[in-house]
Amino acid sequence: MRGDQMSKTSAILEEDTARTTAHLNVGGGLRKKASGVRQWLLLDSTGQTQVVEAGKHTVMRRTGLPARDLRILDPILSYPSTLLGRERAIVINLEHIKAIITAHEVLLLNSKDPSVAPFVQELQRRILRHHHATAAQEGMAIEEGRASTSSWQEGIHSLDGLKLLQFEFIALEACLEAACSCLGKEARTLEEEAHPALDKLTTKISTLNLERVRQIKSRLVDITGRVQKVRDELEHLLDDDEDMFQMYLSDKLEQRLDNASSFNKLDDVDESEMNDRLASTLHLTPLTYKVPRPMKGNENIHEGVETGRVSHGARTSIARSSMTNKHHDVEELEMLLEAYFVQIDGTFNKLSTLREYVDDTEDYINIMLDDKQNHLLQMGVMLSTMSLIVGALVVMAGAFGMNINIQLFNGDTAAEKEAGMRKFLFTVGGGTTGGIFLYAIAVTWYKNKWLIQ
């Protein structure tokens, strides 16, 4: 029944883990066997942690992943956020989390990173809680007797009344929560720094304030791109049931064990059936027919071969029908992904709002600069007009200052000299008054033509 099958599966997984650990550990310690060896933090289904050093090929044999999927976790290569579901493992590259999740363990690459330490503690706590809940459910099942298949299909409930997720979903949820929380925290920090800086820039436009806003905008673009990539990955998974089904590692492992046991039973039945047919052919033929008919044995042999082919086809159809029945049952994972999609979408909307606020501030600053530029242009027009008028007065003064004999100050008597002074002052005053009058006329004409305000 289901309880015996789970015990058998757990025994197989423990044996596999022990065999892999023995393969990685040599002489009671860890040592590198190849240049591509890296340190991995291994967390098993019981919450135990162990640091192992394994090469690329060892990890590939352990998880069944191709080399191109392992390159996604390479810290040297800059790959964007990725969630991949494969036959035996889930590859996760989200922010600072680079991990491989199987049906019974988690391999974490950069476990020595200080930013990963809180995630490791949280992941270990969740795995331990899941292990205790699973053990409690198995104990209850033993006390109550063997649970029926229908009760297991309805869902196992943990001690607190919530549905108990599979191991790979527990680890996947921890990774998603860590990544979304990290991005949300960075977005909140950026928002707290951006609003005061933008408000200060609108009050006073200076080089220091402009540099602060430029740095904030660069960080905003970077965080928005990272959030957008995680959001796109979750949206892609939610839109594709096939990709979500690939992440049901425990169900696929259980299905492989069921198919293997079914195939063994069918092989035993086919073998006994063939033996019975051959035995009946050898013993009954001499008694029934006086004339030996060698073709009878051949016909029975061909019939046995056809029976074997039919049995093989039955085995194949059983496997395909079993996988098809579970193919669309992705509601559990879909609900999990939707929760974190809503969270990361909220972070993305918050960043979009902040981006709009930055753009509005830039537009306001540009309007202020344009207004100041317009005032400078108006001042330039007025100064140019004033320069033109002053230039005309300078021309007049230059004409009087030429070394030419003028009778204005050549009088012999004091009266004539006084009359000459009056004429001089009249000429200067008249020229100045005329220049001011011309300047007023020019300014009035500029305003009528809307050249200045």
Image (cartoon, rainbow, N blue to C red):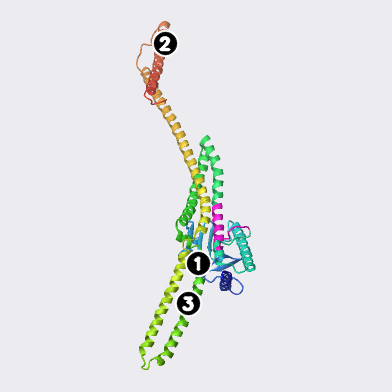
Q: Main secondary structure of the magenta part?
A: helix
Left-right relation of 414 to 40: left
Where residue 140 sits in the image (x, y, percent)? 64, 65
Left-right relation of 4 to 450: right
Q: Nearer the viewer, residue 209 or 181?
A: 181
Q: Which residue is mark 1?
A: 252
| In the rendered image, the vertical position of residue 260 relative to residue 217, given as above or below | below
Is there any visible trace of residue 74 in the rendered image? no
**Could you tell which of marks 1 and 2 lies nearer the N-terminus?**
1
The residue drawn where x is 52% and y is 58% is 332
Instruction: Give the extent of the magenta segment.
Output: 160-181
- For the residues labelled 1 and 2, the Cα–Cα distance comes to 116 Å
- Inspect the image, locate mark 1, and give the three-letter code of the amino acid beneath it: Lys
Evaluate if marks 1 and 2 touch, with contact meaning CB atoms under 8 Å apart. Answer: no
Q: Which residue is mark 2?
A: 421
**Could you tell which of marks 2 and 3 lies nearer the N-terminus?**
3
- Inspect the image, locate mark 3, and give the three-letter code of the amino acid beneath it: Leu
- Inspect the image, locate mark 2, and give the three-letter code of the amino acid beneath it: Met
Where residue 400 sits in the image (x, y, percent)? 37, 17
| In the rendered image, the vertical position of residue 257 relative to residue 285, given as above or below | above
Q: Which mark is residue 266?
A: 3
